[in-house]
Amino acid sequence: MGALTEAFRLIITLDPDLFEILWLSIRVSLIALIISAVISLPLGTWLAITRFPGRKFCILLLNALMGIPPVVVGLLVYLLLSRSGPLGWLGLLYTPSAMIIAQVVLITPIIAALSNQVIENLHQEYSDTFYSLGVTGRRAVVAYLVDARYALTTCILAGFGRAIAEVGAVIIVGGNIDHLTRVMTTAIALETSKGNLTLALSLGTILLALSLLVNSLVIGVREYAAKRQYA
Amino acid sequence: MKRLVIFLALAFSAHTGADTIIAQSTTSTQNSGLYDYLLPMVKEDTGVQVNVVAVGTGQAIKNAMRCDGDVLLVHARPAEEKFVADGYGEYRRDLMYNDFVIIGPKADPARVAGAGDVREALQRIQQAGAKFASRGDDSGTHKKERSLWQAAAIDPDSGSGQWYLETGSGMGATLNTGVSLGAYVLTDRATWIAFANKQDAVIAFEGDENLFNQYGVIPVSADRCPNVNREAAETFTQWLLSETGQAAIGAYQVEGEPLFFPNAN
């Protein structure tokens, strides 16, 4: 109960620290989502409609990578971006960009694997039609993505959910630096370690509310668009 | 499309300016609120923006060895001196001190409060079969704790998972675990005073001179790590060691108690 009251107090008083952290969380995860979607949706679709040796293995790999622990992704990206690592010269470690990179690595397999399944179901239905119309290659990928856009929103939301909720990767590559790389999840971890359990829980409640808001918005838009289309 | 590119470019631009440095730090200085209090003063006096990555001392030193920091602020003197001797640090200076305490349930099942010294306190915990929560993470506090067990001629590893519980986590997480299990925990006093989830735990043992806790500051070597911001790191270090910095550290209090005592040499 105390956590809910505290959450309300933070929101109503427009607590500047809270909104800074919240905004960074949204910004990092949204950019990671956009980049990841651009990679993973065509990849998942392409894997669903193309036949080549090793395709099954690629899909298996994508599915397995859905379960990769965020802390492992964080460690890999850290070693890559460390000043003594191969990409150290970019100076990206302990910046929001590093967090975006880690989240892209984390959620790309999720969106790719889920969208692959969606398109594969569709492909069984459409493959003959598309073949007879001569729709192949890049045009086919685009056609499938457009046709399956409503089902694909769920895949994208799953990716967003994973990105906004994970702490293991961003705390390693971002460093949880105040006013620079502190996001909701790392702030929750920090407040828990300070023993401020009520504040930590209230931040968790706010994060959950944000997730609820984003999901409602996306599903609202989807329903509206679907209604207009068939009206 | 053009707008998206600009958007992404802005999002990807590093926020590191000429006067920005990364401090690899122990957690106690962050969890106790010391940085929230000190760093705005540093910024105002010197213009240097210090970004703190707070991890355990062991991890902070390893991160700095990979050149991922401009200055190191930790508390494990032998490891710090090795860091400098191996060429990773420019020099090491004492910065401030406080002390470690053993906290435990108010009922004090191992009767630690009556122990003559810290060795006896640890022996009583082991003999009583009372739970002890250890950091288990190679942090400064963990190194200290291991040396205290050794001095008490006890090998806690034989009871690992039974009465000796290694959390492998930070000080705060270990305190949360210890307090919930009614275990004894070795913690620095600053983190304990600022810790907000004490429940029925209290300081069970304190005051032995072997519980002294020295913090040191080391600018990372520019020879070893050409990427470091040597100048700003030096400015920050010298501010901490200056009369102004030392007075500021001494003046910091939580709940009416000073947490760190300046002793720059």
Image (cartoon, rainbow, N blue to C red):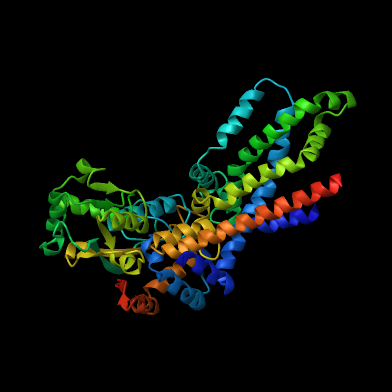
Q: Position of residue A169 (x, y in %)?
A: 52, 48
Q: In which quadrant will I find the C terminus of chain B?
A: bottom left
Q: Is residue A11 left or right of residue B120?
A: right
Q: How many marks?
A: 0
Q: To which quarter of the image does residue A106 belong?
A: top right
Q: Is residue A137 visible?
A: yes
Q: Nearer the viewer, residue A134 or A120?
A: A120
Q: Nearer the viewer, residue B120 or A225?
A: A225
- Say above or below: B86 vs B70: above
Q: Position of residue B36 (x, y in %)?
A: 45, 71
- Say above or below: B262 vs A159: below
Q: Is residue A176 visible?
A: no
Q: Is residue A163 left or right of residue B208?
A: right
Q: To which quarter of the image does residue B18 belong?
A: bottom right
Q: Nearer the viewer, residue A181 or B180?
A: B180
Q: To which quarter of the image does residue B55 belong?
A: bottom left
Q: Position of residue B148 (x, y in %)?
A: 19, 54
**Residue shown at the point (70%, 55%) measured from the top left:** A217
- Say above or below: A218 vs A5: above
